[in-house]
Structure formats: C-alpha cells, structure tokens
Image (tube, helix red, strand yellow):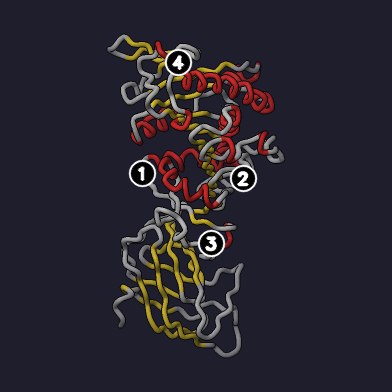
Amino acid sequence: DNEFKLLCGSGEYCDNFTDLNLSHCFIGTSLYVRLLLYTRSNLDCGHELNHHHLSTQPLFNLTQPTAFVIHGYRPTGAPPIWIDHIVHLLAEQEDMNIIVVDWNRGAANLNYFTAVSYTREAAHNLTGFIMTMEEEGASLSSVHLIGVSLGAHLAGFVGANLKGKIGRITGLDPAGPMFTSATPEERLDPSDAMFVDVLHTDMNSFGLRGAHGHIDFYANGGADQPGCPKTIFAGKSYFVCDHQRSVFLFLCSLNRTCSLTGYPCSSYSDFLDGRCLQCETFKPASCPVLGYDVSQWRETLLQLGQTKVFFSTTLLIQISHFGFHLSRQLFQTQILLLFAPSKLLRLEQYTSTRLLAQFDEDLPNIQKISLRINTGNVIGPRYKIRLLRIRFTPLERPERPLMCRFDIIMEENMEVAFRPLPCDSRL
C-alpha cells in the first residue's frame, strides 16, 4: 500500500493517507486508524502520530488549537481528493495543529453497513487520543472536529464520549442512510460539542434531513445543487455531486472566494419568497456566514436555540414594491422579469411585495431591464398597471447603491424596458 513517500531533496519520509483500491473493498477492510499531523512547518509532509506518546512529537504543539479532519465512507478506497486542499486552507486561518483522521481501513468496504459499524470503534480510538492530549496539557475547548458525511457522525460520537466538552464540531452533509430514524444519541446532535454547525447539500439522497446543530446551513434548500447531473446517465457524478458539494462549499468559504450568508428562515420556500432577510437579531449585526468564522455568532446562536439558515450559491437581489417575479435567464445586460408560472400574485391598489431573485453570475452594471407582466389573457381588454416604485437591493453586495425606478405604466402582456437608477435620484 502506498502510505509513504520520500520528500525529494530532504531525505525525509512523509506519511501519506492510506491509498487502497477496489480489490481491498471487495475483500473488505478491518478498522485501523492513523492520525496524520500537519502544521504550517510541514504542510506538504504528514507525520503519523503515536496515539499514546505525544511528547515525542516535536511538531505537535498542545498549546495551539487542533482541528481534526474526518472523512466518510470510501467505497473505492481512494484518498479523498480534497484532503490536501483542506489542510492548506485550514493552516491559512490560524496557526494550529491539523490532524487528518485516516480510517480508510474500515471506511473502504463495498458493504456500507460495515463502515457504519466501524464509526463507533473509530470514535473510541479518537476519544482516547484526545483524552491523552488533555492529560498532556491541551484544552478540549480548543479542539475542532470537522466530519464529512459518515465522518460527521463519527465526530458526534467522539463529542458524546467526551460529554460535549469539545469546542466545536462541523458536520458537512452528515450521512443519511442508516441515520434517518436515529435518536440524538445515535447520530450527530447539538449536545456533542460546545458549538455544532452543520451544512446540508444532499438531504434527499446521501445526506441527513432535519436540523442537527446549533446552526444548520441549507445550501440551495439543502437538496439538489445547481450544476449537478439530473440523470443517472452522468455516471458516478450523479450519485456523489450533491453530497460532495458540502466539502467544496466549505473549502470555498475557507479560501475567502465566496461569502455565503445564511438567512434564518422556517423553510426554503419562504426564503425564496424574500420573507427571511432580516438579520437584526444577530450580533454582530449581520446574518451568519458559512465557514470557519461562523463561531463569532456562537453566543447569539446558543441563546436562540437551534437555528436553520438558508442560502443560495447564486447572486441574490431583493426586489420589492412590485408584483412580478424575476427569471434566472441572463441576456448579457438585459434581464427578463416574469411572473413565476407556479405562483400567482394578486395585484391590488397600494400594496407592495418582496421577492428574491437569483443569478448565476454577478451583474455589476445593469444597463437595461425588460419587464413584462403576464396575465395569461389572450382575449378581452388589456389592463394597465401603474407601478409606483421598483427597488433592487443587492443582498450580497451591500456596498452597492440601491437601484430604483419610479412610476411606470404597464400594459398586460406588453414589454417595457428601462434603465434602473440610484434610488436617491428621481427622474
């Protein structure tokens, strides 16, 4: 097995993540847990830790925070493609110990139920290691477990073994199969750590439905993700794309290339209708952002209790004071405004409404908006509607000015085009 490599030019041996193949999975593997340490001084060269003699590990600084990265089920036996990325990105957040929990021998089985049965044993092993850390001076509150899929429940078992004294557990799309009817003691739950944050991306397949942390983020509703295949003809990607999206979104947040704000809401449909865009109850005075820094909202979240937040991975713009929906079709600088075909809105005198629009890319300089109110009428008189104000609020670009248009006369089923202007400048 390829578990070691020679670091060119230095003569130093590095410990690699266990690399298995399908033959191991067919035969079945027995659990063996390896702990690979990475720090800022050895980001590209893992060092396997002795489970019992930490004082002999010069790179392991027990006074610093420690993040454990715990993978999930490995049906092919291959190392996760994201391991190196998450190690490097975590090291950029702060100076810490990063320990990759390699339980590939155990997770690599064609029989998923066997891998599930090993999570308790692997958790017992990891619990013993963390207890040794504590005995040698480490603080449990400085320990952060990041578990992916089945690894999220494994992290929860470790936290439960340690009576919830672990500082933080992050669950990336906790596994659903065999956990859908589990009690809190049989899966990840908020009592497993001082702070538990969870990201959902595949609740209708390999992920777990419901809320299981102090804060649960639901990406695009927590189920089907944009860009993932919709049919089985796409092969392996059809099965893993939505589930893996949780890892890639977390990596994106660590890389600071995407700021994913979660809006507290009771349902995804309410979120899409623009009913859940208020963040005044949170301190700091903004809604929680997915990622490593979400712990800054911890005290507020602990006071609020379990909180569900929703976000979209497309650009969000709040559109208020008008009676139509914005489609997600992009025509360069032209935007087509339409009624949502599945939802009819009632337009009445002196009423206003608020809707949420989503775009696949940023539109910094909108030159023209084409607007049409579709009523479905093909015969009969054409009705006219007077829109007193349309306001566009860029939720994810608060530094940009609000854009408005005032006093537009519209005839049903007829297109009107206009250029939006800053709200403080009336025509």
Q: Badge 1 local density, few (<14 within 10 Å), some, or many (20+)?
A: few
31 sits to left or right of 395: right
Residue 383 spot, x, y in % from top left: 53, 88
Q: Which residue is mark 1?
A: 256
Q: Amino acid at mark 1?
A: Arg
Q: Amino acid at mark 4?
A: Leu
Q: Which residue is mark 3?
A: 272
Q: Where 420 falls versus 407 (above or below)?
A: above
Residue 203 shows which numbered tag?
2
User: Does label 2 or label 4 sit earlier along the sequence?
Assistant: 4
Instruction: Tell me the residue at 35%/65% (across/down).
Output: 333
Quote the CA–CA distance across marks 1 and 4. 30 Å
Quote the CA–CA distance across marks 2 and 3. 18 Å
Q: Badge 2 local density, few (<14 within 10 Å), some, or many (20+)?
A: many
* SS for dot 4: loop
* SS for dot 2: loop
Q: Disc 1 or disc 4, which is closer to the eye?
A: 4
Residue 299 spot, x, y in % from top left: 47, 47
* SS for dot 3: helix
Q: Which residue is mark 4?
A: 49
User: Does label 4 or label 3 sit earlier along the sequence?
Assistant: 4
Quote the CA–CA distance across marks 2 and 4. 35 Å
Q: Amino acid at mark 3?
A: Leu
* SS for dot 1: loop
Q: Where 410 falls versus 317 (above or below)?
A: below
Q: Amino acid at mark 2?
A: Met
Quote the CA–CA distance across marks 1 and 2. 26 Å
Q: Nearer the viewer, residue 260 or 336?
A: 260
Instruction: Tell me the residue at 47%/20% (across/down).
Output: 133
User: Does label 1 or label 4 sit earlier along the sequence?
Assistant: 4
User: Does label 3 or label 1 sit earlier along the sequence?
Assistant: 1
User: Does label 1 or label 2 sit earlier along the sequence?
Assistant: 2
